[in-house]
């Protein structure tokens, strides 16, 4: 019994470390690009760099795994949006927000730098079909602008997925800008109330000053 519990304990620790590795990797690659050093990932995850290489044989393998996970999250969000009740714009906006929250578009910088696996290709093709369906339905019910394409939505997700996170003000501004961008997808004159609070000039200007400068 003790041996079995020991194995379970080691397995639970390995799973925990893997989650830390993936979460840290996604954050670092999102903000620093695919060229970020592995040491930055290890520092953020709070684990030794050897942990990465025990689980993933190379940086490329790690990026491939993260790309596949991101595509799977996008697919799940697209299916949820397609199945949701309501108008097409609301479905598209909900899809975008879920994808941005999960940072599914944060690995765009890895394009052309890693080999594409068969799993990645299959997931990409499925995701594309679902996004085309989602945006097509929104155009058909007249709730989004007629020139909106699925790729426009994809690039929007990628852009906001790379936004640095950290301070409350940064998150506030990012949320407002995303709402503005989504509002621009609508047809007609309908507008969504902006979330959060209006940014202030003191915070905006304060970024340029440091306490240690006379």
Image (cartoon, rainbow, N blue to C red):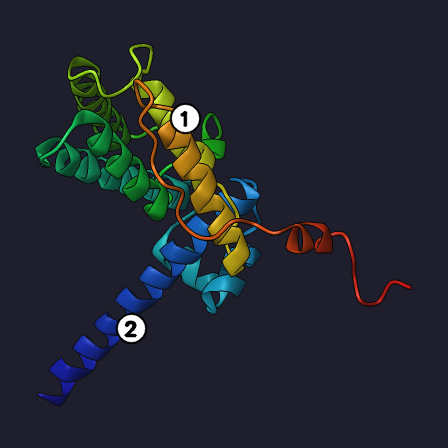
Element type where label 2 sits in the image:
helix
145 relative position to 79: left or right: right
Disc number at residue 13?
2
Q: Is residue 179 above or below residue 12?
A: above
Q: In this view, does 85 lie above or below 7?
A: above
Q: Percent position (x, y) of residue 41? A: 50, 57
Residue 59 visible at all: no
Residue lying at 16% horizontally and 13% vertically, measured from the top left = 140
Q: Is disc 1 surrounded by few (<14), some (14 to 19) or many (20+) residues within 10 Å?
A: few
Residue lying at 45% horizontally and 28% vertically, measured from the top left = 111
Q: Percent position (x, y) of residue 8? A: 17, 76
Residue lying at 42% horizontally and 38% vertically, measured from the top left = 178
Q: Is residue 136 above or below residue 193?
A: above
The residue at which mark 1 appears reads as 155
Measure how far apart labels 2 and 1 are at the Cα level. 37 Å
Element type where label 1 sits in the image:
helix
144 relative position to 113: left or right: left
Q: Percent position (x, y) of residue 62? A: 39, 46
110 relative position to 100: left or right: right
| Among the two numbered marks 2 and 1 on one chain, the one whose residue lies closer to the N terminus | 2
Q: Is residue 192 above or below residue 124?
A: below
Residue 188 visible at all: yes
């Amino acid at each position: 019994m003790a041996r079995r519990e020991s194995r379970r304990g080691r397995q639970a620790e390995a799973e925990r470390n893997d989650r830390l590795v993936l979460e840290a990797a996604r954050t670092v690659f999102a903000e620093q690009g695919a060229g970020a050093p592995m040491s930055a990932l290890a520092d953020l995850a709070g684990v030794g760099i050897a942990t990465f290489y025990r689980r993933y044989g190379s940086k490329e393998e790690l990026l491939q795994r993260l790309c596949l996970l991101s595509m799977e999250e996008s697919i799940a969000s697209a299916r949820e949006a397609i199945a949701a009740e309501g108008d097409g714009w609301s479905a598209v906006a909900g899809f975008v927000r879920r994808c941005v929250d999960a940072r599914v578009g944060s690995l765009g910088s890895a394009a052309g730098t890693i080999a594409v696996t068969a799993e990645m290709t299959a997931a990409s093709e499925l995701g594309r079909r679902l996004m085309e369906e989602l945006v097509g339905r929104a155009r058909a019910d007249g709730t989004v602008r007629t020139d909106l394409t699925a790729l426009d939505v994809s690039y929007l997700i990628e852009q906001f997925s790379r936004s640095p996170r950290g301070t409350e003000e940064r998150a506030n501004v990012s949320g407002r800008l995303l709402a503005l961008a989504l509002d621009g997808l609508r047809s007609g004159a309908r507008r969504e109330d902006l979330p959060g609070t209006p940014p202030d000039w003191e915070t905006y200007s304060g970024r340029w000053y440091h306490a240690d400068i006379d």
